[in-house]
Image: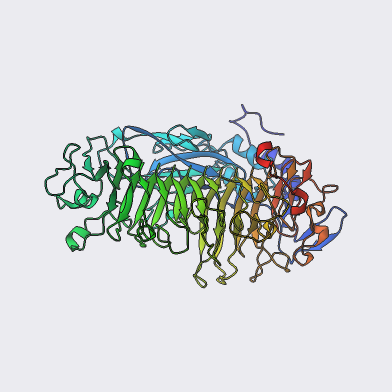
Amino acid sequence: MNFPSDAKSNLDPSIYIRRNIMLRAMTGLALLCPVSFLGNGEIVERMNIPMSYAPENETAMAYWTRPQYLDVRGRMKIGVAAYALEGIEKVEFYLEGDVPVQLDGDFTLDGRVDIDDLNYILENWNTTGPRQLCQVLGNWGLVVDNSTVIGTATEELVNDETGELEYFFEFDSNQYEDLSRLRICAKVYPTVGIPLCLEGDFQDNKNVCGLDVYPFNSEEEILYVSGSGSDESGDGSIGNPFATIGHALWFDAPETNAGKHVKLLEGEHYLPATPSDRALRNTNSSGRDVLRWVTIESGVDPELCPIVGSEGSWQCKVHFKNVRVTPQTEEDQEDLLGGGSTRSMYWFEDCHIEGIVRNAGSDMTVRSGSRIWSIGTTWRRQFQPAMRIVDIQSTYDLISGDVCLANWINLMSNCTITNRGRAFDPDNPDETASEGVHTDLFQLHPGGEYEDALDYNNIIIRYNTCWDHSGGQMFFGSFGRNENPDTIVQNMAVVGNNFGQWVGITEDMTIGGLLSDDVGRARLFAFGSQNTKNMLFQDNILFGKGNWFGGPSYYVNDWGNPYYVNIKWSRNYRTPDKTEMWMPMPDAPLSAGSFNTDYGAIEDRFNPETDTMPWTSPTTGVHYDGDFDGFASHDIGDYIPNEDFLENF
């Protein structure tokens, strides 16, 4: 029973509360019970740790789909990819310093505290409580003026400028002074939970920062470089171009090369080295500052003006636009796009980057330091180009190492991965595979930081496709080598992906190409650290085997805390027809296969005959929901052969 919508004045809310509060409070007490009740009435001790699902304690997850420090001409649709355990209510955008106010008690987020908020509390008493009720009563009738908000998004739509599903608004750069750096911030309100503010400097905390932009509506100067140009007699015009990129950047001894725009004409091109002259070196736009990008763009067909090498290490903030990077030798390939420090930052937009080899140590991008945005770019024949902050609509082919690393990525969306790991390379038929390297699609690990407190935070992996069994694990990671009790992975959404570890397998069950190991060895999903919280796995297609990392202590870590807190596993299936739900071990039903009983009692696994969805596992604490006709097996023998999988789906 709710208050009528027209009863918003002259009403004492205490009358309705007294009639309903006791029953709802008693219902809420069940969440605090430190035991697990099975379908047969048996009670299993849970080491006095409540295995409950409480989305009201968690924040939203969101990240910008645009690169930092970009120029904005005219009107631009700017937004975020955003998720929460129980969905998103709205996103408000504002300029730094003008933070929107949220009233305590305004749970419906309409800028006022009234009957609607009281109804919300009473309808959701299992996830709210007396504290939230007091917030409503204590602020009854208050109204807030959020005039500082420059844009509001209440639904997820396709941004036709980025091709991405976003919560976005239209930013009008004409209202602001040219080249006056602005920081756009976002406040992301979950339907249930704690709002997330994306604000502050990217340099201070890339995980939850604002978006720095430069309104720029003036005429832009373009400098041209050609293989037939001259650094002595050229003036940088299209009719009289320079010969080298480096000369175009520093010929006029600028205070900074930030904002310079170079277009490449016919010929092979080499990236410059950081100048040895200290004065010129200090003019480089750095990845450590908030200045604009140096832009290098193809001025003709990219195949006619490739970048084939470099003159040395160049540490700069560079926007590569519609260029081909195709070194001709292994020597040219190594560290071609390097820098290896935070002074380097790269934005690849609609580029094609292809190597000669894919051995460890041969990467064009150095593994430490440089932050990367990859938008619509193809990466081919690389070892591990995994240092992206944002990766949208990119393609990865013949990548022999990890494709994506959790300590770098914040948003990976609509990417396609083929021939990963040690798949056969038709252009290098005699290649010998590197041994002892990771070949995972997504990797969560501490690297060499065994004692540091790591915080892998605010990560969105969505709508990516990898139907490929040629590598190792697909979704893998633990902090097993890191013993710091403050290490945590949190606030992560994995949504709408197609991951097929067992797609296209043949009866001999071998991985194609250079790896002869049994394809059944690798797991599609092997995930979890000793502190893992606030994660959403939703609407994914998962074909393979997998499990939550844990241990004999019922998934309780070395410090007496649950491994998993507020993890939601929702509507994940083996095939696109969504008939077989895919659940990780040790929570999957017995029909899915056997699993080490030291890591989860048989009677605690989901039983389709007696258990119903939603269901919270008494073993892992993971919260499951979704419809099902059956459950996917974790036994590869049940799916051999399936060469026609892609034809059927």
> Percent x, y for residue 194?
55, 49
> Percent x, y for residue 132?
61, 47
Q: Is residue 231 above or below residue 647?
A: below
Q: Residue furthest right?
A: 40
Q: Is residue 365 above or below residue 109?
A: below
Colour scheme: rainbow
Q: Is 532 on the left or on the right of 294, as rendered?
A: right
Which residue is located at x 23 percent, y 37 percent? 220
> Percent x, y for residue 276?
21, 63
Of residues 544 and 556, the one nearer the viewer is 544
Of residues 4 and 448, the one nearer the viewer is 448
Of residues 229 and 278, the one nearer the viewer is 229
> Percent x, y for residue 472?
61, 58
Q: Residue furthest left?
A: 233
Q: Is 60 on the left or on the right of 621, as rendered?
A: left
Res 593 quadrant in image: bottom right
Q: Residue furthest front?
A: 430
Q: Count the labels in the image.
A: 0
Which quarter of the figure is the N terminus placed in?
Answer: top right
Q: Is residue 219 above or below residue 346?
A: above
Which residue is located at x 44 percent, y 42 percent? 376
Q: Is 84 on the left or on the right of 359, as rendered?
A: right
Q: Is residue 83 visible?
A: yes
Q: Is residue 634 visible?
A: no
Which quarter of the figure is the C terminus placed in?
Answer: top right
